[in-house]
Image (spheres, rainbow, N blue to C red):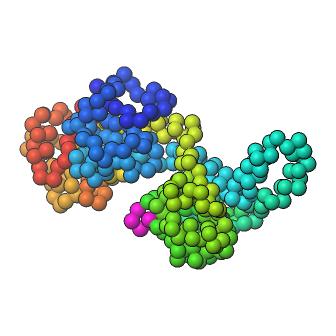
């Protein structure tokens, strides 16, 4: 029986996928797994039984990843599950920036009591005239799940699309339209494109990447879109660029005191993944990842441990070990198993930075003493025996 706790409301379409072997608990410290969306977990104390945290979404800045890794808690996210919802809002953001739709709607509301509003609108509309997206150059920085969808959609809108991602995955490369020009440097996008949208994770190397120097390389009147993370853009530099007119519009999904209300800023209240479909997709993926790990030990889409998948163990018994990535761990594991005359039917070992994960299938029963001996090895953080 597995106990789970939801820190945030999780879509029922995801929760309903759990079998009768899963029961909800009100106390997070009693749970084997926690499902979360945006709740901040940095100050939480984790119970000794907690094995997994599944984030129904992509960002995990609300979860203490290093702390979890040290306690042998695998943290999952759901990359790509909300990609279509974000893609559609990015396209909407480009349309809002190219046509003064918001200004036009505000004018109508301000003149709602005008008996001649239809006639007066014909005179007023020239103040809200804009340009079309077709034929314009769009630069997409980051060709992950969302960036690929945005790039492909823009091609269908008739835009000339530049893509930049030095670490593009094989899977993303297969999905990318052949009509997209692959920029060799990010500066090429800054210099050439009329619209620039950024879709990269927030890391030390990407925080503040859209700074004064980057903006200085851009065309006058450029439109910059940020539906990834607010920290990717130096907001002080962006405000200066909006005030000077260097940047025509900054479209962002992240309201902050610095950018809200600035002329030329189109600020959306973090609606990127706020669709029923995205929430359902994230819930289903998070639950699937959690169940696969708890029942079979398989890891997919972890952010603090390596991905490792050996399918179902069949008739075998499975041992999984979360440990530090240090030399001679495998040798010590096999020595313990050999002492009890246990035969290894299959094994996998993967590492990610300071941490590693080992899966071992055994073709016989596993004595309780084996798990105890494995836990006693220095560097081992957690041992699970899956029968």
Q: Is 162 one of the magenta-colored residues? A: no
Which quadrant, please, contains the C terminus?
top left
* Quarter holding residue 160: bottom right
* Quarter holding residue 131: bottom right
Residue 193 in view: no
Residue ID at (28%, 53%) = 66
Q: Is 95 situated above or below 215?
A: above
- Residue 261 in picture, x, y percent from top left: 59, 57
Q: Is residue 30 left or right of residue 234?
A: left
Residue 371 in view: yes
- Residue 107 in picture, x, y percent from top left: 77, 50
- Residue 130 in picture, x, y percent from top left: 77, 61
Front one among 145 and 237: 237
Front one among 83 and 316: 83
Residue ID at (26%, 55%) = 355
Q: Which residues are magenta?
A: 203-207
Front one among 113 and 35: 113
Judged from this view, the residue extending furthest toward the top is: 20
Residue ID at (75%, 57%) = 99
* Quarter holding residue 9: top left
Please, what is the dominant secondary structure of the magenta stretch? loop
């Amino acid at each position: 029986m597995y106990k789970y706790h939801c820190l945030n409301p999780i879509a029922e379409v995801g929760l309903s996928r759990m079998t009768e072997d899963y029961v909800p608990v009100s106390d997070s410290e009693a749970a084997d797994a926690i499902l979360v969306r945006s709740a901040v977990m940095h100050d939480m104390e984790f119970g000794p039984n907690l094995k997994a945290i599944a984030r129904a979404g992509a960002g995990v800045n609300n979860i203490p990843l290093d702390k979890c890794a040290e306690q042998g808690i695998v943290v999952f996210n759901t990359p790509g599950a909300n990609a279509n919802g974000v893609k559609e809002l990015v396209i909407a953001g480009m349309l809002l920036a190219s046509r003064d739709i918001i200004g036009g709607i505000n004018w109508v509301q301000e003149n709602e009591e005008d008996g001649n509003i239809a006639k007066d609108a014909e005179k007023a509309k020239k103040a809200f005239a804009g340009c079309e997206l077709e034929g314009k150059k769009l630069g997409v920085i980051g060709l992950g799940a969302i960036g690929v969808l945005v790039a492909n959609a823009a091609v269908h809108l008739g835009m000339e699309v530049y893509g930049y991602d030095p670490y593009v995955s094989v899977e993303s490369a297969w999905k990318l339209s052949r009509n997209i020009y692959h920029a060799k440097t990010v500066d090429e996008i800054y210099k050439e494109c009329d619209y620039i949208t950024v879709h990269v994770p927030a890391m030390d190397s990407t925080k503040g990447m859209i700074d004064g120097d980057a903006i200085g390389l851009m065309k006058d009147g450029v439109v910059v879109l940020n539906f990834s993370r607010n920290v990717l853009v130096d907001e002080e530099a962006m405000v200066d660029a909006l005030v000077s007119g260097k940047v025509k519009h900054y479209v962002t999904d992240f309201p902050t005191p610095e950018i809200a209300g600035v002329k030329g800023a189109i600020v959306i209240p973090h609606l990127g993944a706020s669709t029923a479909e995205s929430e359902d997709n994230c819930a289903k993926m998070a639950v699937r990842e959690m169940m696969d790990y708890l029942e079979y030990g398989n890891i997919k889409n972890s952010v603090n441990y390596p991905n490792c998948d050996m399918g179902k163990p069949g008739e075998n018994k499975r041992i999984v070990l979360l440990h530090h990535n240090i030399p001679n761990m495998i040798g010590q594991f096999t020595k313990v198993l050999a002492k009890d005359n246990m035969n290894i039917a299959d094994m996998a070992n993967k590492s990610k930075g300071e941490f590693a994960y080992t899966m071992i299938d055994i073709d016989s029963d596993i004595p309780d003493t084996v798990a105890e001996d494995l836990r006693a090895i220095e560097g081992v953080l957690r041992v699970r025996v899956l029968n």
